[in-house]
Amino acid sequence: KFISQSVKSNREKSKIKNTMITVQILFWLALFLVFYTHLGYGILLYTLVKLKELTVKPVKRQLPPDKLLPDVTLFITAFNEEDVVDEKMHNCLKLDYPKDKLHIVWTTDGSNDSTNERLKAWPQATVHFQPLRQGKTAAMTRGMTLVDTPLVVFTDANTMLNREAIREIVLAFEDPGVGCVAGEKRIAVQEKDGAAAGGEGIYWKYESTLKALDARLYSAVGAAGELFAVRRELFTVMEPDTLLDDFILSLRIAMQGYKIAYCTRAYAIESGSADMGEEQKRKVRIAAGGLQSVWRLRELLNPFRYGVLSFQYISHRVLRWSVAPVLLFALLPLNVAILLMGGSPIWYGTILALQVLFYILAMGGYYLSARQIKNKLLFIPYYFLFMNINVMKGVNYLRKMKGTGAWEKAQRTKTESLNQ
């Protein structure tokens, strides 16, 4: 009986030990992947770029004379943009590119405000209107059948481009290996902006740095719809319900063997979301689009076929849109479980304290945001947590989709003219 109890006790101890080891492995794996997704990849990417540029010097290219520049279509997809039509057209006409070679095209999808009436006052613009609203992706596909220039620059109606943007984009296409050029998105942050605009601005500064490093290593991983360009013959028809048309289109071009160049000297300025409720609309849709993209671009998960591009895609996008948010929220309960099972109070107690501090700071950011009090230090953890929560909500958004790419626009902050 004594021996039997001893064996049973040893088995229970062994079972507890094995459980402890399993939980610890899960914890450290989760911690590593969360860190790698949000910071580690950036550190590794910077190191790889510096090593590459020790031996491979970038090629400097020059634009041909104006008379030899290619014709370019500036393609604007719009839905109910009456408030920004005039400002956008003023911005387009100030762009530094030969007027006879820059063709301004608006494809309006189901607009039922005065967008089309306002555009009639601008003879420099060609307007393709369809009363039925089918979403941005369907509008792009419809409009592209009417475009015959070799290069197409996509931009949003509510974003303003810097004067040199088109020339800088065309210069990037002087490299025959470039099939898509991603411009830089910048958020016009004002002193009075809250967590939505302030957090978005900080996020995009970091994101822009990663995109630039990606391009220097091999290729940028996707483009932002505010400003990107493609070679017309590489445009591929996308599924009508595509949520991230810019991302899907640019990466499908990359999957054909072309690179996505990132051009920091061509940028689009956009005001931030009016508040966190409006920003949530954007983030949930983007998260849903990210999950949708992971499935539709699943071939790109094969590093044996796509090499460095697969590594960049998985590190920069897939982890962020799939496992990283789940693992982030799993860290706290895993940490508590390890301490309850007798884990080192020095190591695991310190990490737990740091996690609790992070959530307290995030709640502080939420509190200040709700009262329109600006504090960048607290907005960072709040916006970070906010983004990851909305990735989880993206799953439900996908489930409720009605089969089109139409979505509700988020309201932006009211700013002085963004025109350059």
Image (cartoon, rainbow, N blue to C red):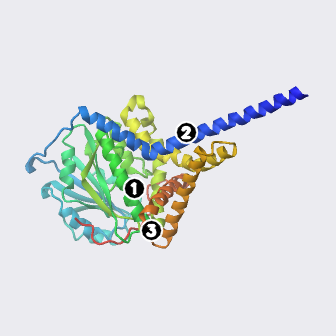
Q: Quadrant of the C terminus?
A: bottom left
Q: Is residue 59 left or right of residue 81?
A: left
177 relative to 99, above or below = above
Classify mark 1: helix, strand or loop. helix
Q: Amino acid at mark 3?
A: Asp
Residue 282 image point, x, y percent: 44, 59
Residue that extends furthest to the front in the rendered view of this protein:
346
Callout in the foreground (1, 2): 2
Q: Which residue is mark 3?
A: 275
* Three-letter amino acid code at the position of disc 1: Tyr
Between 156 and 51, the one nearer to me in the picture: 51
Instruction: Find residue 362 and report its horizontal and vertical position in percent.
Output: 51, 60
Residue 97, percent from left and from top: 15, 56
Q: Quadrant of residue 1?
A: top right
Mark 3: give few (<14), some (14-19) or many (20+) Cα within 10 Å.
Answer: many
Identify which amino acid the numbered label 2 is placed on: Leu
